[in-house]
């Protein structure tokens, strides 16, 4: 069994997919930064950012449905910002009685909450498009190009390389447990043992997984050594940044900067 | 069986103010620079394969779960195990790698918020783990219960302290009031931490009987560990004192957060000559602009949907995409 469902990359042919990974990486970060810096309740700015990211989603061939479905994953965190509706003082909107407490929602609080949720939703969409339209090795190269330390980028690469191997390993451990004791799909059959026992066994499996990882890393090290590894991370040279790349990057950054400037002037 | 990405401790983008994000990025980068240097000295050329595969193992280990009740399950974060197995400096790099890939690929935590997430799970988690584990090992004077109890307690406290840090960051950003965020986050993670503690305990019992040498029982601590021990002590104490203080007297935090708000407010009346768009029939201005915003969002959505549908029509015609799309 090989775990490919983990990899969010969607192999399609589109202008977004063929764009240089460095441009995509920088523009994604700039987009998220713009969303973060945009003042609270600057709705027109948010809507223009949404229009931009939706356009990219359509252009990339990923489709809005795919991106929006994945974006739902970040939704539960919105709960953390919910109390803000009631704690920021302002024009009273409605009252909510929960037991002995009387909570008063303010319109300023509601505006703040919707802003946080909207910004978060915009940012997560940008990150999804980046991950789904860029191969991981290209992303690694982009990270190296923007100056992330070589060793760290090398680590990301190795982790990615062995992630699938070790997830397979973990799934084998889980399947073995299900076969021997764990659970049954039939109703009424409860998983074996007490809660503490089950936790203990999950721990043993985690230990086993780590042990296998250690042993594998020994083998990998020896294999790398046999091919002349000396502790230095060697990578292909980063290709030059062409004129049209500069143009794309510049246009994107210009658009975001304009949005940000107008947003802070009008609603700051 | 699938990878369930969202854990309550990974802060997504949008929830931290830009200032808080940048401050924690800076702190994380500084600490990582030290850790990278230390690790290079201690592990040498073996570091890359060892840490890379261990990061992957932590990732995979987060799939190992056990049934608790009613469809919920406990699972592993792995900070403490990594700290015990490869030492604090390497564990910082390992956890940074794990958290970064979670954000980059699985959108589990934001990119701008990544600095704060690295700080909470990579730096605070590891330092607190190391501090608690080594302290209890010393108390046990080399008896084996020190390893198990120390590991379990370290796992529990690293989760709780890291969640306190996340709550404080949310409160500082003005996203979540301190008197609610701190007790809520701490409460949830005191429960989640029990699962982490039990799994870590089980893993250490297994490793103790299978490969005792990996637990570095008789080895002396790597250089610079004292600094981490002190750091863990300071962090644990500061957060333990600061959090209840902040949650009972949120004014202090709000004052700090408010200074950003003040800066924004001071700039406000500059360009207010352009009238705000107001909804007819709704006197509450903020509410009216929210409604206008929702209307605008729906409009953009409608246009995007129309474009997407039109394009799909074209696509069926021309088949421009490869068959690898399911």
Image (spheres, rainbow, N blue to C red):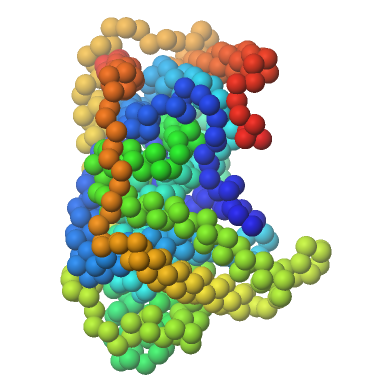
Residues B167 and A150: in front is A150
Residues B318 and A9: in front is B318
Q: Can residue A161 be seen in this view?
A: yes
In the picture shown, does residue A241 fall above or below B9?
A: above
- Residue at the image point whose x is 38% and y is 60% from the top: B52
Residue A105: give x, y in percent of width and height. 47, 33
Tally of numbered tags: 0
Residue A114: give x, y in percent of width and height. 46, 30
B229 left or right, relative to A142: left
B233 left or right, relative to A1: left
In the picture shown, does residue A96 fall above or below A213?
A: above
- Residue at the image point whose x is 25% and y is 25% from the top: B265
Quarter of the figure with the C terminus of chain A: top left
Q: Which residue lies furthest to the front in this view?
A: A227
Q: Is residue B174 visible?
A: no
Occupied quadrant, residue A137: top left
Occupied quadrant, residue A2: bottom right
- Residue at the image point whose x is 68% and y is 61% from the top: B70
Residues A259 and B260: in front is A259
- Residue at the image point whose x is 62% and y is 60% from the top: B72
Quarter of the figure with the N terminus of chain A: bottom right
Residue A161: give x, y in percent of width and height. 45, 54
In the picture shown, does residue B32 fall above or below A64?
A: below
A37 left or right, relative to B2: left
In the picture shown, does residue B272 fall above or below B123?
A: above
Residue A139: give x, y in percent of width and height. 38, 40
């Amino acid at each position: 069994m090989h775990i490919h469902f983990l990899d969010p990359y969607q192999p399609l042919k589109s202008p977004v997919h063929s764009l240089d990974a460095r441009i995509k990486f920088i523009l994604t970060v700039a987009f998220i930064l713009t969303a973060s810096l945009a003042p609270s309740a600057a709705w027109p700015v948010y809507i223009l950012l949404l229009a931009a990211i939706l356009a990219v989603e359509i252009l990339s061939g990923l489709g809005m449905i795919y991106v929006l479905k994945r974006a739902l994953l970040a939704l539960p965190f919105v709960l953390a910002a919910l109390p803000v509706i009631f704690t920021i003082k302002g024009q009273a909107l409605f009252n909510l009685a929960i037991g002995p407490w009387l909570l008063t929602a303010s319109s300023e609080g509601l505006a703040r909450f919707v802003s946080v949720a909207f910004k978060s939703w915009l940012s997560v969409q940008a990150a999804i498009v980046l991950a789904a339209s860029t191969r991981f090795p290209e992303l690694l190269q982009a990270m190296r190009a923007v100056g992330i330390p070589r060793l760290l980028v090398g680590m990301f690469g190795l982790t990615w390389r062995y992630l699938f191997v070790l997830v397979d390993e973990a799934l084998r451990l889980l399947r073995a447990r299900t076969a021997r004791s764990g659970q049954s799909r039939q109703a009424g059959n409860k998983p074996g043992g007490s809660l503490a026992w089950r936790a203990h066994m999950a721990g043993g499996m985690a230990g086993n997984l780590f042990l296998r990882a250690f042993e594998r890393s020994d083998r990998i090290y020896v294999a790398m050594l046999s091919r002349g590894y000396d502790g230095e991370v060697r990578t292909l040279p980063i290709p030059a940044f062409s004129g049209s790349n500069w143009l794309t990057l510049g246009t994107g950054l210009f658009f975001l900067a304009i949005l940000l400037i107008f947003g802070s002037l009008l609603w700051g | 069986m699938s990878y369930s990405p969202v854990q309550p401790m990974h802060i997504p983008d949008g929830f931290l103010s830009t200032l808080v994000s940048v401050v924690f990025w800076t702190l994380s980068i500084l600490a990582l620079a030290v850790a990278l240097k230390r690790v290079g000295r201690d592990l040498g050329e073996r570091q890359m394969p060892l840490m890379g595969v261990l990061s992957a193992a932590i990732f995979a280990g987060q799939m190992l779960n056990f049934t608790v009740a009613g469809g919920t399950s406990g699972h592993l974060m792995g900070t403490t195990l990594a700290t015990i197995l490869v030492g604090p400096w390497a564990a910082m790099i390992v956890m940074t790698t794990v958290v970064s890939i979670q954000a980059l690929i699985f959108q589990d935590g934001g990119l701008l918020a990544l600095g704060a997430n690295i700080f909470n799970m990579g730096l605070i988690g590891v330092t607190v783990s190391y501090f608690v584990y080594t302290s209890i090992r010393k108390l046990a004077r080399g008896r084996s219960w020190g390893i198990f109890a120390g590991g379990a307690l370290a796992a529990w406290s690293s989760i709780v302290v890291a969640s306190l840090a996340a709550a404080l960051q949310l409160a500082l950003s003005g996203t979540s009031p301190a008197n609610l965020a701190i007790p809520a986050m701490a409460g949830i993670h005191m429960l989640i931490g029990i699962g982490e503690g039990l799994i870590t305990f089980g893993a250490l019992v297994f490793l103790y009987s299978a490969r005792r040498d990996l637990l570095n029982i008789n080895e002396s601590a790597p250089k610079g560990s004292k600094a981490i021990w002190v750091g863990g002590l300071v962090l644990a104490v500061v957060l333990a004192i600061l959090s209840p203080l902040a949650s009972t007297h949120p004014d202090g935090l709000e004052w700090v957060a408010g200074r950003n708000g003040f800066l924004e407010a001071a700039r406000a009346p500059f360009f207010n000559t352009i009238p705000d768009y107001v909804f007819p029939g709704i006197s509450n201005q903020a509410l009216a602009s929210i409604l206008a915003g929702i209307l605008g969002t729906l409009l953009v959505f409608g246009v995007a949907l129309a474009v997407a549908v039109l394009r799909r029509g074209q696509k069926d015609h021309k088949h421009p995409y490869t068959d690898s799309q399911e």
